Image: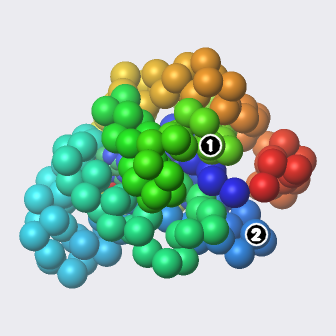
């Protein structure tokens, strides 16, 4: 099972990704969680990333690529994973395709295009997202940052939906429902693909 979770901030992708990863016993890899841990630990990377995160901007692609490459090469990521919050830009998606070739060690015969990668999009209207995010209370969940994160999502991440749809790897699910309903729908949509 190789899954990418997309969707705007507040769509519930973190929650759903975590639930399904526990159910399927595969790692839940959240680039936001990794970055927040680096910020808390005050690593070099954390110090570079923090100002972008606080402003609701994306952290530069190069920093993400190193993080993801290192994480995907860990032994627990061999038999599948759920990636939550990556890729978020077209260059990240292109990098990820190349990385999948290397991780599989198949000498280029297997890429993101050929493998059984699925990209899940959780669709939720903006007004619901803002309400959800404001009630979450994370450090980057103030109104100004929320608005910027939504704008960044529409500009930089939404084009990936078309990218994966064109490759017939997109699974689109309505995320504006009770959490359990969304989980059930995701299980149904993804079953038989592992
Ligand atoms: P998240 O927890 O996924 O909402 O991510 C929180 C913040 O971390 C985002 O607003 C970005 O600043 C940063 N971030 C997480 N993943 C990425 C990514 N793939 N590319 C760039 N920035 C990211």
Name the one closer to the observer, 163 or 39. Answer: 163
Q: Position of residue 50 (x, y in %)?
A: 18, 59
Any part of residue 65 in sight:
yes
For label 1, the crowd category at 10 Å Cα-Cα, with few meaning under 14, some 14 to 19 and many 20 or more, is some
Scheme of image coloration: rainbow
Q: Position of residue 167 (x, y in %)?
A: 61, 24
Q: Against 84, is 47 above or below?
A: below
Q: Against 138, is 52 above or below?
A: above
The residue pinned by badge 1 equals 115
Q: Which residue lies furthest to the bottom in this view?
A: 41
The residue pinned by badge 2 equals 24
- Of callouts 1 and 2, which one flags the residue occurring earlier in the amino acid sequence? 2
Residue at the (62%, 51%) spot, across then down: 3
Quarter of the picture containing the C terminus is bottom right
90 left or right of 11 in image: left
160 left or right of 138 in image: right
């Amino acid at each position: 099972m190789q899954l990418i979770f997309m969707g705007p901030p507040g769509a519930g992708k973190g929650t759903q990704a975590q639930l399904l990863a526990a159910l399927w016993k595969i790692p839940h890899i959240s680039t936001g969680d990794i970055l927040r841990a680096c910020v808390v630990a005050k690593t070099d990377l954390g110090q570079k990333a923090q100002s972008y995160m606080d402003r609701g901007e994306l952290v530069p692609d190069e920093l993400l690529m190193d993080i993801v490459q290192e994480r995907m090469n860990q032994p627990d990521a061999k038999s599948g994973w759920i990636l939550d919050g990556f890729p978020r830009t077209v260059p990240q998606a292109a990098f990820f395709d190349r990385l999948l070739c290397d991780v599989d060690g198949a000498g280029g015969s297997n890429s993101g295009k050929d493998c059984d990668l699925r990209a899940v999009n959780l669709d939720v209207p903006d007004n619901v997202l803002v309400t959800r995010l404001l009630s979450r209370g994370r450090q980057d969940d103030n109104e100004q940052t929320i608005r910027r994160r939504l704008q960044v999502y529409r500009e930089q991440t939404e084009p990936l939906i078309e990218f994966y749809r064109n490759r017939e790897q997109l699974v689109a699910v309505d995320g504006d429902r009770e959490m359990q309903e969304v989980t059930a729908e995701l299980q149904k949509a993804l079953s038989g693909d592992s």
